[in-house]
Image (cartoon, rainbow, N blue to C red):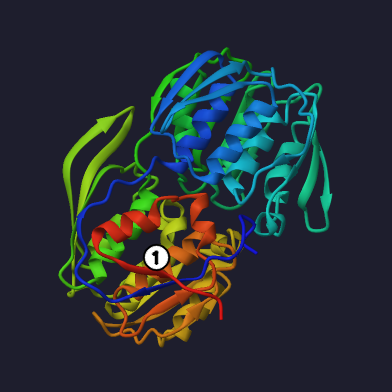
């Protein structure tokens, strides 16, 4: 079971070149944060371009359960009447965050310094993922938590009645953990400080400043030191959500490996803490250009044009780039399989604890498709087979992971034999229009019967 209904097996096969314009849904990271910060503001926040995937819809439901008034006015158009910092009420029922690690960890942070008791759960994939990386720093504020063995969901958090400000150094680069601590710091007195040795996506810092919080970042010998002054009155905003670079990665990479392709992907956010994949692809020799570069809502944006790139070569991806492209390593590995030479990816331990063990899932599927892969605790390497050289012909296990499913379907468009996935259902959590969007570009995707 996918956690979102019966499994949806799907097969991708070679077809014509991919051509046209791929209009990607809104950025998932910014969509989550828009709803949460809107709920923590006083007044009405208006949001356009919200991603309406299941992950974000689960966060919207959670904000309503805490007492915010959350209303959909049309496709992508939402409003949130917030209850203010410290104003969350105790939900009547369990908060189900579905498949979303981002959603559950950010919501835990947002409620951690309010004296309410909340139980969180999720689908089978989310219930298997560790939460101690968030609950440990939240405990420094005075938050108590109890969950299953290994710090796993279902888990109950009791918010701190008299929270203390915290100074916390991230043990590993994680925008989710950083954001949870900052959101908890909103309702703590004094200054909450987060220190990160490596820069992670900074949407939370940018958006907190936009909502009126007093927040600053300094680069020191320790790393990036982020200081938040607690107990502000957040001002409601009008937010235009840019389109998601993590979702854009799939049509972009599919075009790069599919012969004759030329795809335009407009209005993609290019925040430097998110654009590591595109930088890496260009270093590999991808014919990937930025057009109409501009700034919207404080975020850099451009139109991406991706063309078939048979000259791509394997490279060693710098480990310090991992935080800016952690969700894109699965699709990068597919591009690496279609390039010439060896691609090495290091400093990626975080991939072991995403929606699935993404290193293991991708390595197993690639090997089944005839690609040589080596892997260790925090690294993996892919031996490229050259353009059109991947044998394919396998059915790959997705492990309830949307990015694993989309990655192998993209590989099937360029491999010698079709590639199938056992369940494409989880794709709806982040990219609900993936299937029709790719078909409109010319991709041969078929739902297959279980036999």
Location of residue 282 in the rendering, given as x and y in whole percent from the top left corner? 23, 61
What residue is pinned by disc 1?
331
In front of the other: 384 or 364: 364
Quarter of the figure with residue 329: bottom left
In front of the other: 52 or 82: 52
Above or below 404: residue 313: below
Q: Quadrant of the C terminus?
A: bottom right
Residue at (33, 28) in percent of width and height: 298
Could you tell me if residue 97 is visible in this image?
yes
Residue at (44, 66) in percent of width and height: 330
Q: Quadrant of the N terminus?
A: bottom right
Quarter of the figure with residue 65: top right
Residue at (50, 71) in percent of width and height: 379
Location of residue 262 in the rendering, given as x and y in whole percent from the top left corner? 16, 60
Location of residue 365 in the rendering, given as x and y in whole percent from the top left corner? 49, 78
Q: Residues within 10 Å of mark 1 (few under 14, many from 20)?
A: many
In front of the other: 225 or 325: 325
Location of residue 209 in the rendering, given as x and y in whole percent from the top left corner? 46, 22
Looking at the rendered structure, the secondary structure element under dot 1 is helix
Above or below 134: residue 416: below
Viewed as shown, does residue 287 lie left or right of 363? left
Above or below 112: residue 24: below
């Amino acid at each position: 079971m996918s956690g979102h209904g019966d499994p949806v097996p799907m097969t991708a096969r070679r077809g014509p070149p991919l051509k046209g314009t791929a209009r990607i849904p809104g950025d998932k990271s910014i969509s989550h944060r828009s709803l949460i910060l809107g709920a923590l503001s006083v007044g009405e926040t208006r949001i356009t371009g919200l991603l309406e995937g299941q992950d974000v819809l689960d966060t919207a439901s959670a904000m309503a359960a805490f007492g915010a008034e959350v209303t959909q006015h049309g496709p992508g158009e939402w409003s949130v009447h917030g209850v203010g910092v410290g104003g969350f009420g105790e939900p009547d029922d369990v908060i189900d965050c579905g498949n979303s690690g981002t959603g559950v960890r950010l919501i835990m942070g947002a409620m951690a310094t309010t004296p309410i008791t909340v139980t969180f759960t999720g689908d089978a994939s989310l219930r298997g993922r560790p939460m101690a990386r968030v609950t440990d720093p939240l405990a420094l504020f005075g938050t108590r938590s109890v969950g299953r063995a290994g710090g796993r969901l279902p888990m109950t958090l009791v918010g701190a009645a008299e929270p203390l400000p915290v100074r916390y150094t991230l043990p590993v680069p994680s925008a989710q953990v950083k954001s949870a601590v900052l959101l908890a710091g909103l309702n703590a007195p004094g200054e909450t400080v987060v220190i990160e040795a490596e820069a992670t996506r900074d949407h939370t810092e940018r958006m907190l400043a936009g909502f009126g919080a007093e927040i600053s970042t300094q680069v020191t010998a320790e790393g990036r030191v982020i200081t938040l002054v607690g107990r502000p009155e957040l001002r409601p905003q009008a937010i235009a959500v840019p389109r998601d670079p993590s979702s854009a990665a799939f049509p972009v990479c599919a075009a790069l490996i599919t012969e004759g392709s030329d795809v335009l992907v407009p209005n993609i956010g290019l925040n430097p803490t998110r654009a590591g994949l595109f930088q890496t692809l260009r270093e590999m020799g991808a014919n990937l250009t930025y057009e109409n570069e501009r700034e919207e809502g404080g975020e850099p944006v451009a139109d991406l044009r991706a063309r078939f790139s048979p000259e791509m070569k394997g490279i060693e991806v710098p480990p310090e780039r991992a935080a800016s492209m952690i969700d894109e390593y699965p699709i990068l590995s597919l591009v690496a399989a279609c390039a010439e030479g060896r691609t090495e990816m290091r400093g990626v331990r975080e991939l072991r604890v995403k929606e699935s063990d993404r290193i293991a899932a991708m390595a197993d599927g690639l090997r089944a498709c005839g690609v040589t892969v080596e892997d260790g605790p925090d690294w993996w390497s892919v031996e490229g087979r050259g353009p059109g050289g991947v044998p394919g012909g396998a059915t790959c296990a997705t492990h309830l992971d949307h990015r694993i499913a989309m990655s192998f379907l993209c590989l099937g468009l360029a491999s010698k034999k079709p590639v199938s996935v056992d369940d494409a259902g989880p794709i709806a959590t982040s990219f609900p229009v993936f299937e029709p969007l790719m078909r409109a570009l010319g991709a041969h995707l078929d739902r297959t019967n279980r036999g």
